[in-house]
Amino acid sequence: MNKRTLKTLEFNKVIDLLLEKAESTLGKDRVKEIEPLTELQDIEYLQRETEEAQSLLIKRGTPPLYGIHSIAPEVKRAEIGGSLSPNGLLKVSDSLRVSRGLKNYIKETKEDKVSNYPIIERLVEELRVFKHIEDEINNAIVSENDISDNASSTLRSIRRQIISKNDAVKDKLSSIISSQDNKKYLQDSIVTIREGRYVIPVKAENRGNVPGLVHDMSGSGATLFVEPMAVVQLNNELRELELKEREEIERILRELSNLVAEESEGIGNNQKILQELDFIFAKGKLALDMKATRPILNKDGYINIRKGRHPLLNVAKIVPIDVYLGKEFNSLIITGPNTGGKTVTLKTVGLLTLMAQSGLHIPADFNSEIAVFNQVFADIGDEQSIEQSLSTFSSHMVNIVDILDKVEYNSLILFDELGAGTDPTEGAALAMSILDKLLKLNVRTIATTHYSQLKLYALTTEGVRNASVEFDVETLSPTYRLLIGVPGKSNAFEISKRLGLKDNIIDYAKDLISKENIEFEDVLQAMEKDRLAIEANRQEAERYRLEVEKLKEDLAVERDKTKEMRDKILTKAREEARQVLRGAKEEADSIVGELKDISLEIEKDRARKIQEVQEKLKSKLNKAEAEVSKNILNVKSNKPPKNLKVGETVEVLTFNQKGTVVEEPDDNGNVKIQVGIMKITSHISTLKRAISQEEEKIHNSTKKIMGSKSKDIKTEIDLRGQNLDEAFLELDKYLDDAYIAGLKQIHIIHGKGTGVLRDGIKTYLRSHRHVKTSRIGNYNEGGTGVTVVEIK
């Protein structure tokens, strides 16, 4: 693609807008490589990428792309056996987290196993997740300069010894400086550090009174910083521990670097995919910002832009334009006054073409069509060059000559003020000659001009069409609307008259120009009046059409209401008929019921007598059973169970058996119980509630769970790398387990980072039912990277 054209049409400014949408330096590097393509298949693929990204952004929001780093140097260093820094390892961890996050992001978009985003889904599927490496790094490294105690048990032990040794040194020095015998020798009663060793400030004249090693001297020489002999050995041991700590940290970093080296190929491939995904989503974000749409592409040289907007102008103020070219005509000549929007129209067509061929959506209405050209040429603006001693005309002509030398079939050429800057007659003739040559080459051309000869040329030449930018003479301002098929009128006389120029001057000016030009301008004026009248008639017809549509809608509503009323009347009639039938049926049922009642009365008399005999027998049996329980077995419940319900488990003390209550106690306290395959009746005083097998199982299970929790639960939880929702879910379960296990104090590791996770956890803990207090960890507990919680 012609580089001069890219600069003239300000394609680089569109790239700058796209750069702002990329999240990472990798993505920005990929954006800088973008350029218009000429193969339709390749461009369609890039357009599908942008469309998928735009759709995903609307449906799922912004993807988790923050944290992509250029880790190629780190991966290479690990491959050759080098040891990575904590910062380098955190960058690797961040990139791995982004890969894992994108997997989840895409997983949530799949519906019914139908791939709606095949390009992006394929890229995400190629990403590999290395959760074990990510977890190892996050477990070992708290920040760029801080290795966690959890990195290894050895490191934890060394640091505990360092803390203990530090305390011992400080205690010893505190006893020295607080001693009344030593205070007179000291400059200040403080402990400080020189060359990594604890020292005390001693007056220079008292050097001999405080045995020890001198490590430094004040600027005045009045104070010596002495390491007392009493702490020399302790300081030596402390330095040895610090060296061991450094060696252990180096070992941990080597070990983590080896993990990265083992998966270097997969991690490196992830980086390439993440770069491409960042680039694709940047295109989608730009499309959303511009309210852009995917254009319909063709290789036939047909342009049909609907309500197109220049991408670099304020979307709220710009007037959209409709431009079409390439079917009925191949050349479009735009005329009209200055500042009317002719140049903006040229740039809009050119820039939207370049954007479409670069795989970007264009700021235009849906179904706008863009042709894929092999070359796009533009001669726009004042090309005057003082250094080359070229006039405006000469400079334009140099550019035009270059275009004519390079032009080929399937090109788009944009001319601004073709033939301007020289004698009008010669300039117009030259412009017509250039346009005629391009017309014969079947090249799509758009040119702006002020020459009346070119307006006439467009009216009389096959394949050439006039267009104009509308100008309101009443307000003396352009409307920026593009009218294709209508040549523009200069309006010089009308504008001058509206501005107050006297009529005699205007009439004399008209006499100075040719009669043909006046007549041509009059024809244009008549055409413009006709166009305005037609437009007014069209608007009137459109108004009538809308009124007819409204009447049709109202008629449809009335028809629906009539149908609804008819349905209601029929429904009411059917309901009344059902009521009559229901009443007749109820009356018949009543008569049948009375007959049944008469039959039942007869049956009840017989059943009553049988029931009386059964009750007497039952009473005697219950009395006998009670006597046996009381006198023979001497069994009695100290506290008879109350409110026994059917289904409860009871223990029958007379038989030492468990059973289930079948019927609730009667007025005499007798209860029917199912014991095994037998049903017995026992007095409530001989019963005792028993624990069911299910309750016993639950009780035993609870004991086992609590024992298991107290055995397996850890006193810390690591939430680094998680978002707030993930962290809250895992933390809530952990707090429940810790409470059940009876832990009194736990540590929550969230890392330092941006502080979002730490603040979110702090707010969450304030209202948790199991939390008594919470605080940020001390220096030896992990500092601001850890929260210490006391459990109720």
Image (spheres, rainbow, N blue to C red):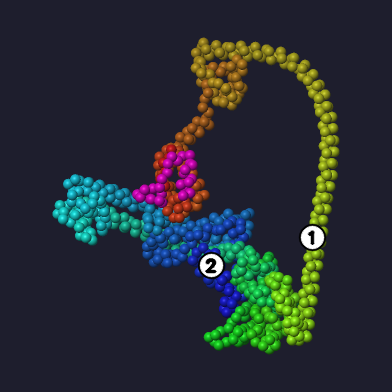
Residue 284 placement: quadrant: bottom right
> Mark 1 highlights which residue?
546
- Left or right of 636, for residue 176: left
Tell me where residue 570 appears, x and y as whole percent: 84, 41
Q: Nearer the viewer, mark 2 or mark 1?
A: 1
Q: Residue at x 57, y 78 (%)?
A: 3
| Element class at badge 2 | helix
Tell me where residue 89 appears, x and y as whole percent: 41, 60
Residue 404 placement: quadrant: bottom right
Q: Residue at x 63, y 54 (%)?
A: 112
| Element class at badge 1 | helix
Tell me where residue 262 appears, x and y as whole percent: 43, 61
> Mark 2 highlights which residue?
19
Q: Nearer the viewer, residue 708 or 461?
A: 461
Q: Nearer the viewer, residue 206 or 684?
A: 206
In the depicted structure, whether residue 560 falls above or below residue 585: below
- Left or right of 513, for residue 51: left
Q: Which residues are magenta?
A: 759-786
Q: Residue at x 68, y 80 (%)?
A: 449
Q: Nearer the viewer, residue 277 or 629?
A: 277
Q: Amino acid at mark 1?
A: Leu
Tell me where residue 747 appears, x and y as whole percent: 41, 46
Q: Is residue 723 magenta?
A: no
Dot placed on the residue nearer the N-terminal end, 2 or 1 = 2
Dot 1 crowding, Cα within 10 Å, few <14, some 14–19, many 20+: few
Dot 2 crowding, Cα within 10 Å, few <14, some 14–19, many 20+: many
Q: Amino acid at mark 2?
A: Leu
Asked whether residue 456 appears in the rendered view, the answer is: no
Residue 627 placement: quadrant: top right
